[in-house]
Image (cartoon, helix red, strand yellow):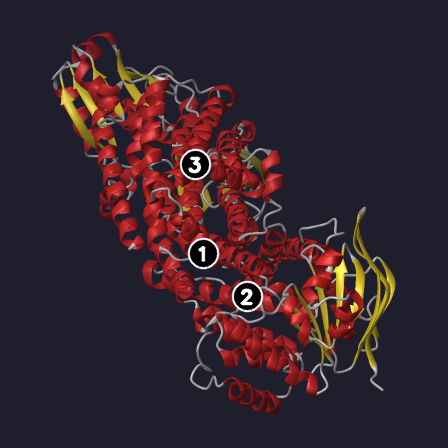
Amino acid sequence: MRPLWFLLQKEFRQIFRDRGFIGRLFIAPAIQLILLPMAANFTVKNVNLAIVDHDHSTFSTKLSNKILSSGYFKLAGYTDFNSKADKLIENDKADIVMEIPQGFEKNLISEGSQKMAIEVNAINGVKASVGFAYLSGIVSDYNNDIRMELLQPARTNDQPVIDVITSFWYNPALTYYIFMVPAILVSLITGITGLSAAFNIVKEKEIGTIEQINVTPIKKWQFILGKLIPFVVMGAVVFTFGLLIAWIGYSIVPIGNLAILYLFLLVFLFAILGFGLLVSTYSETQQQANSLMFLFMMVFNMMSGLYTPIDSMPDWAKLVTHLFPVSYFIDVMRMVVIKGSGLYDIRMHILYVFLIGLVLNTWAIVNYRKTT
Amino acid sequence: MKQLLSFVKKEFYQVFRDSKTLVMLFGLPVVQIVLFGFALTNELKNANVVVVDNAKDLASQQIINKMEGSNFFHVEKTLWSSSQIDAAFKSGKIKLAVVFPANFNTDLLHLNKASVQVIADASDPNTATQLSSYVSSIVTDYQTQLSQNSAMPYTIIPEVRMLYNPDLRGAPNFVPGVMAMVLLLVCVMMTSVSIVREKELGTMEILLVSPVKPIMVIISKAIPYLILSWINLGAILLLSVYALDLPIKGSVLLLVAESTLLIITALSLGLYISTITKSQQAAMFASMLGMMLPTMLLSGYMFPIENMPIVLQVISNVVPAKWYYIIVKDVMLKGLGFSAIWKETVILIGMTIFFILIALRNFKIRLE
Amino acid sequence: MNETVIKANKLTKRFGDFVAVDEITFDVHKGEIFGFLGANGAGKTTAMRMLCGLSIPTSGEATVAGYDVFSQPEEIKKNIGYMSQKFSLYEDLTVLENIEFYGGIYGLTNKEIKTKSEELTDKLGLHKEAKKLVRSLPLGWKQKLSFLVAIVHQPKIVFLDEPTGGVDPYMRREFWDLIYDAADRGITIFVTTHYLDEAEYCNRVTIMVDGKIEALDSPSGLREKFNVQSIDEVFYKLARQAKRSAD
């Protein structure tokens, strides 16, 4: 046991001495936790709308006002000329162009229907479809307004009405922050601990101190534990720091039991550090470790359900993502922090991550034995 | 010139022998394109949904049938109570519950008014709003079905045309972003790390002592990554044309020229970072913070800029990737020419010159 | 009579078809300063790694400090010290912290560590630098400190792999003083080097060529046998037949 103690003492000394490291441990997470949620907002608002009004009638003016006062749209231009509007879409000044034809009001009343052209910049598919959905929703609302005006009121009461009462549980304000911040914290911890662990071991390989250790009576398991334990501590510290920032910066307070989170954090770190160890056994230089870890981090970030839902992925992708400990932790964080899920609810998550960790660590240790 | 060539050769050997780094450099664009193109989407499918049908009448059944028929939902019928729904949400089993009151149809027939309760797990607000609005529209459709007047008078018919991307695919949006990311990554991070590595190992001094001018040493470091970036660019364009069915509408030459401009900006940024960092780890970290993060967040390809707080919107103007993203979208997707992007190009050139100047200035200072 | 602390009999290491160490046989006695000379690629480092428990021999047998290199490498490690070519000390730890670490690893008690620390800093005159990072020490001091740390636990044998590379002759002389001191205290020194003049400092020297031991004797014995004035010439005579050149 004593050798392990001395190993740990050395590791911690080295970590604390690297001043840049401590900064990276706290500054990077802080910046990312503050910036990322602010930027990572997928809701569609402030759609730039250009209106080409060939009619200049009461109807067209009322319609335009109704659209602009909805709060979803910003007026990018109000013109008589199609060409001007087209230019606006080309220059990305307008996302949507709505053209009200000449004789709109007159023809609507006399013929009973009227077409209206809408052009949407569909490069961003989500923005296009949601923006169009808003617009057509408002147009159809306005349509009903016209009908109310022109038809006898009695006729409109004949229609059966089904009221859809929607309640949003756990996050009634529908804030995106509470959904993103815990997940981003997971991504950060993965990056920081996994990357640091891989680097640390590769650095010793690069410098040659590993050989020195090999000659001493330090057993392999002691060496590995001596490397992993500081990073578990580091992970817990960053996690706590992250929770604090979430609380202070975003007023996010976990509904569920904090102890459950820390328990899962431990299992998670077991897995992710095993992964870092594994990568280090395949790297000779820090640059290689960096390249490999970076590639994996990118895949984790994209596929773990952080930004896009796992349920929407094709089956092959779902299978792959279920191999990543990150996906489980993000799920657990969201479940426990936002909904207050309990230990029983996440029992399978714990089991799977533990198994994955077992595989990764075993693989890493076997590989490590072979290469040194 | 010959000396420069030998330096460049050495750099090439070093880069190409590091197979793991190469895997990352070439794997990155491929992975991103595969994932964005085939795996990631914000659209919902097969969401687990529960229906509590207390009415068990014609009306509720019709609505439930519509839901079962839709791709969005995977419907299970239960008789759960509120607390059971809560438990199901907490264990992640379902995302939404629809509850029909016992007198649904009777109310509809006699009072012309009935209500349906939709309970959404709003921990994921996007999913919750999408799912609940799908349910709403199904209910509204049914409501319209019931109405006596099938044809409504005075109808405005919007005719919509989706420009540039009629199928509403995700690809057009992210491919330009992937291009920016990959080019920046290769040039900034790899260049800075490579230079710092020589500093760390002590071989930089040997290079500086050789008869070759220091500026040539730097250029020799940059050239392999310039070429790698071109190869990467070519790979991405090929992939997007043939694998993602996204043709290049505008001039390929213009696209390559603008990309080269970005590459030079990135190389200068990489050089600058190498002058202010002492260790490889620090260089990587600086590249992450100074380049990767802003590119991902503020270039507009992952998250729309107009949604961000004003502060971030302003900061995004100094991120080169933001301007490049606009240029690529305009040239590649809209097929526009130089006249449309001359402003962005000038801005990018300005940034390039700025970075080159401060990088060179710093580099000269370091030497003395 | 001196006990034998290292015994090697037809010790061989093969890497595929390549025979790095070819059936070497020798004995090392307690308190001896035993030198392994040879050109780069001759097999000295490979041979030493086998004796340290870092590499399993392909065939032959050897015991180090009484333990078998095949079946008891862990026991060997407890009884030896090692100073590597590249690095023994952690640059980002202080002198005292390095002593503490290696002392603790080898099982010294806290009191023993304290005593040793004082002893070492006294011996090297490093009182002012004791709390400074090793990184800031000049190369000569680092080497000396490395050696003393390698024997902090009073091992039976200490293995030195090219310990004086890059150090000026004056420092090298001082370094060898430390080695003599250790040998006097009963520690056996097993040292590999390609500095031929250092052969003169050893009690006995082997010269390896192409994986084989071509000569094994005291320096004076070798000079007599080959009828030359210096070990250099002995070496050149043997090395001319060498076929391998890079380690």
Quarter of the image where the C terminus of chain B is located: bottom left
Residue bearing mark 3: B225
From the viewer's side, name the closer residue of A325 and B351. Answer: B351
C104 over A16 or under it: above or below: below
Quarter of the image where the N terminus of chain B is located: top left
C174 over A104 or under it: above or below: below
How far from the left and from the top, in percent, is residue A231? Answer: 53, 65
Residue bearing mark 1: B200
- Which amino acid does the dot numbered 3 rest on? Tyr
C160 over B36 or under it: above or below: below
- Which amino acid does the dot numbered 2 rest on? Val
- Which amino acid does the dot numbered 1 rest on? Glu
Task: Identify the mark nearer the N-term, 3 or 1.
Answer: 1
Residue B103 can be seen, yes or no: no
| Residue A232: mark in rendering | 2
| Left or right: C92 as drawn, with respect to C21 | left
How far from the left and from the top, in percent, is residue A159? Answer: 35, 26
Task: Tell me if label 3 and label 1 are in contact, CB under 8 Å.
Answer: no
